[in-house]
Image (cartoon, helix red, strand yellow):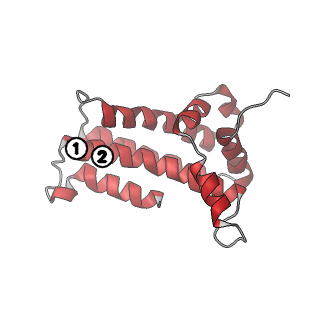
Amino acid sequence: MNPDDLLTIAEHLASGWVRQQPGRPIQAELRRAVSAAYYAMFHTLANDAADLLVGGRTSTRTKRAWRQTYRALDHGRVKSRCSNRIVRRFPTAIQNFAEHFAKMQQQRHLADYDPLEQFSRFRVSQLIVQTRSAIDGFLAVHSDDRRAFAIFVLFDLRRD
């Protein structure tokens, strides 16, 4: 899943482009845009974790191990870890990603499950811009820090 493609789709949905009525998106388009933006963050993290822990496309990784690591990412656990104060130990860009991840998961839940919630084009466009910025900042962080974050969100914390 290509996170950049998901953000592009989110932008198209938020602009009303999908129905070929730019500037006049309907609620369904705005809601799907929020969901696509959230999933761009989720798949960024899943892809990065799998690449950093198992190996990228140029490595001798096994598809099975890479897929298992990619799929190991759990939405609830990631949100919980992103809200954990331990995240403050990571570089600022990872902290920003974590904070925005938790925010976007909440927004996705509203978009997908709250029929009374109303989304404006401006609100959704801002979320998409913020999401792209959070992803870009996250991917600019040194791979050692991103690997540590992947381990933090994937595995149980142990005190011993």
The answer for how far apart the CA atoms under marks 2 and 1 are is: 6 Å
Q: Is residue 16 left or right of residue 79?
A: left
Q: Residues within 10 Å of mark 1 (few under 14, many from 20)?
A: few
Residue 125 visible within the image: no
Q: Quadrant of the C terminus?
A: top right
Q: Where is residue 120 drawn, in percent x and y?
A: 24, 37
| Residue found 63% across the figure and 27% down from its top | 84
Q: Which mark is residue 145?
A: none
Q: Residues within 10 Å of mark 2 (few under 14, many from 20)?
A: some
Mark 1 element type: helix
Q: Amino acid at mark 1?
A: Ala
Contact flag, marks 2 and 1 (Cβ < 8 Å): yes
Q: Amino acid at mark 2?
A: Arg
Q: Is residue 18 left or right of residue 57?
A: left
Q: Where is residue 115 drawn, in percent x and y?
A: 24, 30
| Residue found 17% across the figure and 55% down from its top | 22
The vertical placement of 50 against 86, above or below, is below
Q: Is residue 155 left or right of residue 23?
A: right
- Residue 72 or 88: which is nearer the viewer? 72
| Residue found 62% across the figure and 42% down from its top | 94
Residue placed furthest toward the right: 160
Q: Which residue is mark 1?
A: 28
Q: Where is residue 4 drawn, in percent x and y?
A: 44, 59
Mark 2 element type: helix
| Residue found 26% across the figure and 44% down from its top | 30
Q: Where is residue 98 drawn, in percent x and y?
A: 57, 38
The vertical placement of 15 against 84, above or below, is below
Q: Which residue is mark 2?
A: 32
